Each structure stands twice: as C-alpha cells, then as structure tokens.
Image (cartoon, rainbow, N blue to C red):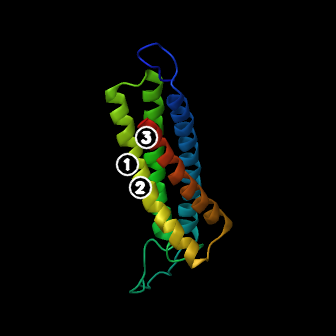
Amino acid sequence: MAYNNNNNEEKPSSVVAYYLVTLNLCMSIVLLSIGAWAINEAIDHGFIIAEGLELPALFSPISFPMGNAATGFFVTLSMIAGVVGVASGITEISLIRRGKNPESAAAASTAASIAFTLTALAMGFAWKEIQLNVRNAKLKTMEAFTIILTVTQLIYIVTLQI
C-alpha cells in the first residue's frame, strides 16, 4: 500500500486505489477470457468456403457468427482494451505498493488513462451491439463487464488525483 511520506500513515485514497486497480485487473482478465472465447468461436464456426470458390465481394474478416454487425468491432477492441488493462493493472499495483511519489503517480495515471480510453472506445461498440439486439448470453456478459470496467477505471483515475 502507498504511504504518506510525512508520517507513514496509510492514505484512504491509496487504499481505495489499490482495491479499484485490483478489481479492474480481475475484470480485464474476465473481459479477455470472454473475448478469447468469442474469437475462437468466430474462427471455428465463421465463414467457411469450399475449395475452388472465392470470397464474396462484401465479405468482412471481422464478422462474427454469434452476434450482429457490431460484434466484430466490439470483441476486437475489447480484447485490445483487456490486454492494455491487464498490463496497466500489473504496473499500477506494483507502483502503488512501492509508495506514491511523483514519478510513480504520473506513470500510474498514464497507464490508467490509456486503458480507460481503450475501454471507453470498446464500451461505445458495446452500446451499439446492445442497440442492434442480436447476441448471445456470453456477449451480453462481455458488454456488461466492459461498461462496468469503464466506470471503475474512471473512478480509479479520479482517486489517483486525490
């Protein structure tokens, strides 16, 4: 946990930040797991074409058989956001445990901001996928995790500034 340099007391914002980054790390891992399942399903059960035939003119390489038109974009961006979220979570936990100094605070804020930005972009596609309304239960779970993760990452960024 981070300590106040003046009197070695634990700051409440550091405790909250530690728990939020741990929650964000776990949620990013879940997001990656569901995204990996979706990509595996798309590869295994996606567009299959017989030998000697050509792909249709409007074929999209990010079309997913289990969702709608936004699913490919949503899953791809969620996977990128999840990888960056896990990497930043590991970095941020390490920085919080070492103590809060200006260099570590700047590094944690930067990593958290990048992860938040990518997750917010994925959240936009999650809302579009919800609007199009054709998806299975695992994709609904992935959408929920993406939206909740975006909010918790924003709260974490705010606690870093306190």
The residue that appears at 49% across and 73% down in the rendered structure is 70
Q: Is residue 17 above or below residue 81?
A: above
The residue that appears at 49% across and 74% down in the rendered structure is 63
Q: Are marks 3 and 1 in contact (CB under 8 Å)?
A: yes
Q: Are marks 1 and 2 in contact (CB under 8 Å)?
A: yes
Task: Determine crowd level at label 1: few under 14, some 14-19, many 20+ residues with C-alpha closer than 10 A.
Answer: some
Secondary element type, mark 1: helix
Secondary element type, mark 2: helix
Percent of width and height locating residue 135:
62, 72
Q: Is residue 43 left or right of residue 139?
A: left
Percent of width and height locating residue 32:
54, 52
Residue type pointed to by label 1: Ile
The Cα–Cα distance between marks 1 and 2, rounded to whole angstroms, is 6 Å
Task: Determine crowd level at label 3: few under 14, some 14-19, many 20+ residues with C-alpha closer than 10 A.
Answer: many
The Cα–Cα distance between marks 3 and 1, rounded to whole angstroms, is 9 Å
Residue type pointed to by label 3: Ser
Q: Are marks 2 and 3 in contact (CB under 8 Å)?
A: no
Q: Quadrant of residue 5?
A: top left
The residue sitting at the top extreme is 7
Give the position of the C terminus as an image quadrant: top left
The residue that appears at 43% across and 22% down in the rendered structure is 99
Q: Is residue 29 above or below residue 139?
A: above
Secondary element type, mark 3: helix
- Pointer 1 residue: 114
Q: Is residue 142 left or right of residue 100?
A: right
- Pointer 3 residue: 88
* Depth order, front residue of 97/101: 101
- Pointer 2 residue: 118
Task: Determine crowd level at label 2: few under 14, some 14-19, many 20+ residues with C-alpha closer than 10 A.
Answer: some
Sequence-earlier tag: 3 or 1: 3
Exactly how many numbered labels are in the figure? Answer: 3
Percent of width and height locating residue 112:
41, 43
